[in-house]
Image (cartoon, helix red, strand yellow):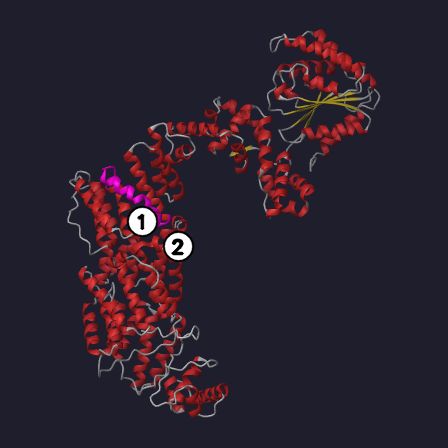
Amino acid sequence: MELSERSHQLDLLARRLGDLRRPAGQAVDARPVIALTGPVGAGKTTLLQALARRATDAGVRFLGASASRAERAVPLEVVRQLVRATPPDDARARLERLLDQGVLTWSDLDDGQEGPARTIAAIGGALLELAARGPLVIGIDDVHHADVPSLRCLDYVARRIPGLPVLIVLTEAPRTRPWHPEVYAELLQPARLHRIRVPLLTLDGTHRALADRLGAPTARSIAEETHRISGGNPLLVQALADDHLAAVPRGAARPESGEAFREAVLSCLYRCEHLVLKAARALAVTDEPLHGALLPQLVDVRAESALLAIDEATSAGLITEGGLRHPAVGRAVLDGTTAEERARLHRLAACLLHEDGESPVLVARHLLRTDSLAEPWMARTLLDAGEQALLDGEVDAALRFLRRAHRDGTDECLRARARSALARAEWRLDPQGAMPHLQGVASAVRAGHLGSTQAAGPIQYLLWHGQIDKAVELVRHLGDRADSSDPRSAAELLVTKGWMATLYPGVTIDHQAPVPARRDPLTIAKVKQRLQGVTMLASVLERGDGGAVEEAERVLSTIGLDDERDMWTAICALITMIYADRLDLAGEWCGRLGRSATVSRHPTPAAMLAALDAAIAGRRGDLTRAQELADTALNQLSPKGWGVVIGIPLAIRLRALTFLGELDAAAACLQVPVPQVLFETPFGLHYLHARGLHALATGSPESALADFQLCGQLMAAWRLDLPALIPWRTESARALLQLGRRPQAEKLVREELGRLRPGHVRYRAAALRVLAAAEDGRDPIPHLRGSVRLLRQCGDRMELAHSLTDLGHAYQQAGDLRQARKATRAARTLAQECGLPLLRPAAAPGRGGPAGADPDVAVLVEGLSDTESRVATLAAQGHTNREIAEKLFLTVSAIEQRLTRIYRKLDVDSRRQLAVRLRLDRPGAMPAERLGAPRKPPGRDGDARR
């Protein structure tokens, strides 16, 4: 690995080594000095070491030394290292005495002052005497750091060795400035110098280097990424290989930059000019490109000097035009920087950016990493950055900025604004997370540190969590302080009161919001937009107004869920489309909003959209999807996090599971704790409605009636008695039918029909179906056909399946078997699509034939299919094959074939034995279970029909 892609350089050195063995004048290249030139970490030292080994193997003496920045001021240190490599004889002793004298001489001279030529000649001459003993190679690593007296002595030798079997091999970093350039230049005169360049590795070279160390399969998988991180610097490639080996037990599939890589990066930087290290730290702190404006100011030099200095790091593969090559390099640089230095650089960067008028977000990123907010503008900048990050949907960044502003800010109004914004940010992630901030916001409002604009969001969160008394108190307090000359504050208070009345229609505030003295057009437009959600919703609930849908679409095209102040308006626009049964349009907009980056990253708006998607699926009759989406919504937030809004997804899930026949799972929804204040909101109406439907399905019509009538009482008290909100009269009529109170049911449903507007298609269809069951002595078919027509119009497949089932039963009672068969088959197809258990007509007791003749009621027997269970039950009740065929819309032959299979499966040979087997042999016996109910667990009623 160490000598990957270095064969050319090794061949050149080998040829020069061979020249030392040739007679004088026959050398291929007579230049006595070789300089291995390349960036830091390129492998120059490794090549010099390889040359030393080859020289020794060839019987050529090698004297080596390594210069360093730390010893540049030590006179003759490099020559002394060379002398130490010679045998301990008289010549070495003489050289050491000369060196000691030379050290004393140069120690008395000022820096840069020329030493006595006699001393240089004596030391140089003694070195030349070594050549008389045979071929000699003198190797100096990092010669650019060599002390001046040593350079003078080497220059003396270089001038006199042409024709002698002596070769001087140096390594240098070309962009590192020598300590005394003029002396350095004398040694490396072009006429005597053979420069061999040592470049960085190519991608292929990186791959081969890794293969030598890690094996070919591993090299293939990580070579490209390793090259991208290292830039082909052999030192960094080797370090990444070391880190990969250390990470293998953890199953690393990519190159990992660990401790070895960090040390290698710092080693490269420490070996460069100090200015390079400063520049690398500045780039790591600012994450700026190479030619950014901050770099020359942070390293405190002119831009040209800074760029010239970091050319060395660029050539070493650490820096590119975009800044530091890779985040791993930046992390390594920062790890090697003290906390104090990092804080200083961040503070300086923040000040420079602030002075240049850069965005608050850019400045705040540096302020976060300072040790203190020493100037007032710093906390203000963090607050502005946090609010901007919120608007941009960057909640995590906003939280970091706002927490620092609140913690270290000294102005109380600023800290109050920061706390209000923190509540807004936390709410997007989890509404429960906003709660700790709301008490502080309330205190700030009372102290006069927050106005209506900043308090609007937190007041909505209080409403979300059911803390209505605190919200009312704050609204009243803001109203007392409101200034009609400030149109924005007055307008914000008006909007807040409007939403409070919508979410808690039973709450009244005996304080009028101030009317703005100045009718600012922009403010008026904003108020109208923010209150559009309320007006659209009222319009569609009261009149089924199609114009409200057009308005909702216009609103959604201009706002989104990025700002929670607009979120309620957007949600109301979606709900408007849902209530208007524009389900395709509502689903399309839910999809658009859900694809935004803001929603996908933030659980609260994502949960709300999932709940609305569930509502759309439920109204389409796609019960399984409705349940799944409701589960998704509920899993996004904790029950406490949902606050009173939990009524929406919980009601959807409860309703879906009920109609799917999963009654135990539905009952579990009722065990989820909900706040009592839920029932002061419209969300509570939906919860009561779903709970009543579950009670109906489980045979508790009294409980169902109580829930439905409670809905009606609340809606009347709130002046929201709108069938499109909750059709409580229709639902109460269903419960009354189960209780046998048909006249009361008919009265209620007729009252409902009288209140419905033409646009309320879905609710009229449901009412007509109930009316068909409630009317005594009248033909139900016209009502049911009207219900089917309307349900096909609005797209509710589940309700359509129920109405078709009733219509098929009505046709059967009227003797129109062809139409009965057609309607019933269509109902069964829809029921299968919706995941419904087999349906049962909603005819009133006593209507529709003799007891026990219902073809949709059967005893469930292990081993029989659903159809076989129906056939077996009807046969056990004494019906002929023809009667069974008519009831089930099958041929007589099909009934005979099924009975044959049933007899075989149950090991019976007559209808009488079949009745005994099904326990229907007693007078007046009825099936104990309904077809379609799950067989496990026992006792679970699967007939979730309405």
**Residue nearest the viewer, comparing 324 with 462:** 462
How crowded pointer 2 is (Cα within 10 Å; few <14, some 14-19, many 20+) is rated as: many
**Residue nearest the viewer, comparing 909 with 748:** 909
Q: Is residue 11 left or right of residue 323?
A: right
The picture places residue 900, in percent across and down from the top left corner, at: 48, 89
Q: Secondary structure at mark 2?
A: helix
Q: Say whether residue 788 is visible.
A: yes
Please tell me in which quadrant of the rendered image residue 643 appears.
bottom left
Q: Is residue 431 magenta?
A: yes
From mark 2 to mark 1, how far is it between C-alphas? 23 Å
- The amino acid type found where label 2 is placed reads Gln
Q: Which residue is mark 1?
A: 559
Q: Is residue 286 left or right of residue 112?
A: left
Q: Quadrant of the C terminus?
A: bottom left
Q: Is residue 352 left or right of residue 417?
A: right
The picture places residue 674, in percent across and down from the top left corner, at: 31, 58
Q: Is residue 355 magenta?
A: no
Picture disc at residue 636: 2
Please tell me in which quadrant of the rendered image residue 88 appears.
top right
Instruction: Name the main secondary structure of what is drawn in magenta.
Output: helix
The picture places residue 584, in percent across and down from the top left corner, at: 35, 62
**What residue lies at 19% left-to-right and 38% top-to-bottom?**
486
**Residue nearest the viewer, comparing 44 with 924:** 924
Which mark sits nearer the N-terminus, 2 or 1? 1
Q: Is residue 660 left or right of residue 199?
A: left
Q: Quadrant of the N terminus?
A: top right
Q: Which region is colored magenta?
A: 429-451
How crowded pointer 1 is (Cα within 10 Å; few <14, some 14-19, many 20+) is rated as: some
- The amino acid type found where label 1 is placed reads Ile
Q: Secondary structure at mark 1?
A: loop
